[in-house]
Image (cartoon, rainbow, N blue to C red):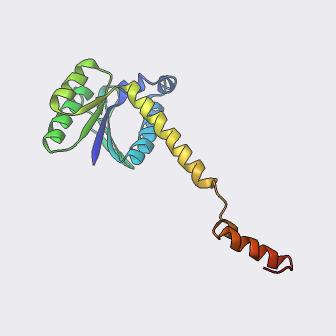
Amino acid sequence: MEILIVDGYNVINAWPDLVAVKDNLEYARDKLVDILMEYGAYKGFKTVIVFDAHLAAGKDQIYGMAGNVEVVFTKEGETADSSIEKMVYYLVRGGERVYVVTSDAAEQMMVIGAGACRLSARELKAEVAAVKKEIQDNMAGKLLPQKRYEIGNRLDHELVRRLDAIRRGGKA
């Protein structure tokens, strides 16, 4: 399984729709989790979102699961970057394919150097939008079949003509 590690506050501060609700940080975090839960489920990722504990008063190294998403608050005094670096190091060494989402240039260089792939917050936003559109298109196709499934569509044209003649009272 591929693993997507996300620097939570980095993404919240980069996406306009999350910046707009950033005054309520708990709501912004929950909204990001919801978005990435759908994205990760569709793409088949295990997703880990890392938040700095200093912005979450009273939380100390808390882990939580929501669907396919694991939410991590760093220890007091530890940054999301250092927590992500440790995760990447161990996961890549363990043979996992890891993607890290951050727009921090120094963090991106470290991620690439450790053998993981990197995505900027903006690239992830575009990916999420593409997946959302693909899901909507797929759902529209399932709910509104393009072809009607009448018996006449499955039978030979000549047989349909003969059956229609019989139905109207004539000879086949």
Residue 52 in view (yes/no):
no
* Position of 103 relative to 155 (above/below): above
Residue 5, image quadrant: top left
User: In the current view of this chain or complex, which residue is farthest to the right?
Assistant: 169
Please state which of residues 10 and 65 is positioned toward the viewer in this rendering.
10
**Residue 143 percent location from the top left of the image:** 61, 54
Quadrant where the image shows the C terminus: bottom right
Residue 45, image quadrant: top left
The residue lying at 47 percent from left, 36 percent from top is: 130
The residue lying at 20 percent from left, 37 percent from top is: 87
Residue 109 in view (yes/no):
yes
**Residue 144 percent location from the top left of the image:** 64, 53
- Number of marks in the rendered image: 0
**Residue 109 percent location from the top left of the image:** 21, 22
Horizontal relation, residue 103 to residue 106: left or right: right
Horizontal relation, residue 56 to residue 25: left or right: left
The residue lying at 27 percent from left, 18 percent from top is: 105
Residue 63, image quadrant: top left
**Residue 146 percent location from the top left of the image:** 63, 53
* Position of 40 relative to 168 (above/below): above
User: In the current view of this chain or complex, which residue is farthest to the left?
Assistant: 93
